[in-house]
Amino acid sequence: MAVNTDPDGPVRRDDERGCDPDDVAVKSFFLGPQAENADWFRAVFEHIVETYLEWRRRIHADDGRAISVADRAMPQFVEKRRVFRSLVHELLQRFEREVPKFSPRYIGHMFSETSMPAMVGHVVTLLHNPNNVSGESSRVGVQLEEEAVGELVQMLGFADGCARGHFTSGGTVANFEAMTRARHRLDRFIALGAEAKSAKGWGGSLFEAAHMGWQSYDELCDELDGDRDSSQFELLSHNPFEVAARLNSVFAEPYRGPVVLVPDHKHYSWVKGVELLGLGREAFWSVDLDHRGVMSIEHLGERIEEARRKGRPVLMVVSVAGTTELGAFDPVAGVQDLLDRYAVEQNIHIYHHVDAAYGGFFAANICGESPGCIMEDGVCDAVGAIHRANSVTLDPHKLGYVPYSSGAFLAADEREYFSNSVDAPYVAFDPDSDRGPQTIEGSRSAAGAVATWLTARTIGLDADGYGRILRRTLVARRRVQQALQSVDVPVRVIPPSSNILAFYVAHDGESLSAVNRRTQEIYEAFSPATDAEFYVSKTALRFSEYEAMLQPLVESWDGQRDDRELIVIRLCLMNPFIVSRETKTDFPGEFARAVADVVG
Ligand SMILES: *Cc1c(COP(=O)(O)O)cnc(C)c1O
């Protein structure tokens, strides 16, 4: 394996001699900004169309033709085709106004070029249109989904055989999938604890019941001889207010529902989730961020203790691997260490979900202590610990270079994965392979799974495949950072963790509101609403959330704190061609000059 140990990327070489192995990986998997791989692309699509047409003709070929040559020659028929063709043309024209996501000049949100294998997987699936709700409506699609899940499970290093999962429309739904499972688990633990307490005088508190863990759960089930029914205490089976009243009397303390512990840089999907579960926003307990803008383990510990004091079970702890705003990594390993100590020392088992929607694919590039590792501190540790959590969210439609919609939910333990099954009598479900009873969504396209399957099998979810692509994005982030810091304006960056770069321009002594106004101007000059040379995104970092990180930054330029937030330009440097020595344009340099022009 030829790991590129030069953090600045491949050494310049003559074009005629062909490129570096790292470049080959990138150049052979993408169409290219100028459609350089057009011949290949066209040939693949011709092959797809021909094979598909042949397949249709072979199926029940003796049935005869429904649309005759004479039909197709009728004037009305010809007219319909003309209308159709002109509308297709209109559609193509209209989409030319779409944001050119494939261009290395698009450096805004979490999307860029999609890989060729992913596009092909998506299109082939579209032609067959399987519904992965069950094997009845998808013979091949469900198998491919299972295999694609297997690829992700292996990339993250989950123990063989136990992990289960499925594809979702995205990270938001995958996060909801985690919440429903955590809630079913909590419901069963509390109900059994209540039953054991009322029937046998079990000595635990409500908090202890809620976090008893599966081993105690099984032991308590055995003790209750199976002839007791704890369902009267299940909030999910009965009127929750009546159940809460029963729990109040059994535990002799008021039951006020669980809390969800999420770091303060939360993705808005968690707020939606808490509302959807009907917990009330009050149940959303945020955990402070430290000076690097990631979850403080110390404060997490304090919040767990606060929950215990107040008799509020912890539905789940969420840590984020690759935050949406800054691409930062919460200390996933440290969070799990803390929760493991609760489990071992106090038999308190707390559900841990890792929202790795953005950053999970960096697991393809874990290179441990190797000197070639170019990931920032803490990223390897965080992604390397994801498999220790209860469940994880991944978005192939972000750093997997797969088209929308493709998200994935994975649970480490099949018992927890299957905990929320429901029945639908009109669909024949095979409990082992069909995901329908376990998914929040009903009908599900197989396209996101198959796109992931083909791209994972072609490129490889390891250091030689995706690892290469992601390393290049890290190189791109460094180049852009260097370029911005070498122009003649005081560009300041938020210390980056991965391939997201956030920056602003601030002169010494300037007020925060003036800095924010300037950032707003930069954004307007490069917003996707205009036809600018580059496309960026922005975000606002609030002091109420990022205090520990922002205060030292403001001090670094002697700024006056006259605003409640710092607005930053946010670049997702995902495009694989931002640093290409063959292109005429030096994208990092040109972007930096364009920023300087706007500011100047
Ligand atoms: C993008 C993202 C989500 C939501 O994913 P969608 O695919 O947009 O639904 C959730 N969490 C994080 C950290 C994300 O980056």
Image (cartoon, grey):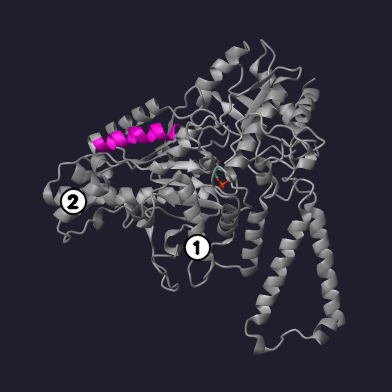
Q: Give the residue displayed 65% in from the left and 25% down from the top.
A: 503
Tag 2's secondary structure?
A: helix
x and y, in percent, of residue 108 in the image: 68, 37
Q: What is the tally of numbered marks visible in this picture?
A: 2
- Helix, strand, or loop for circle 1? loop
Quarter holding residue 462: top right
User: Which residue shows up at 59% across the image and 60% down it?
Assistant: 447
Label 1: which residue? 442
Is residue 333 highlighted in magenta? Answer: yes
**Quarter of the displayed picture in which ligand 1 can be seen:** top right
Q: Nearer the viewer, residue 473 or 269?
A: 473
Q: Does the magenta-highlighted stretch encompass residue 63?
A: no
Q: Amino acid at mark 1?
A: Gly
What secondary structure is the stretch in magenta mostly built from?
A: helix
C-alpha distance separating marks 1 and 2 = 35 Å
**Which segment is the magenta one?**
331-344
Dot placed on the residue nearer the N-terminal end, 1 or 2? 2
Direction front: furthest residue: 17
| Residue 187 showing in the rendered view | yes
Q: Is residue 68 left or right of residue 387?
A: right
Q: Is mark 2 within 8 Å of ligand 1?
A: no
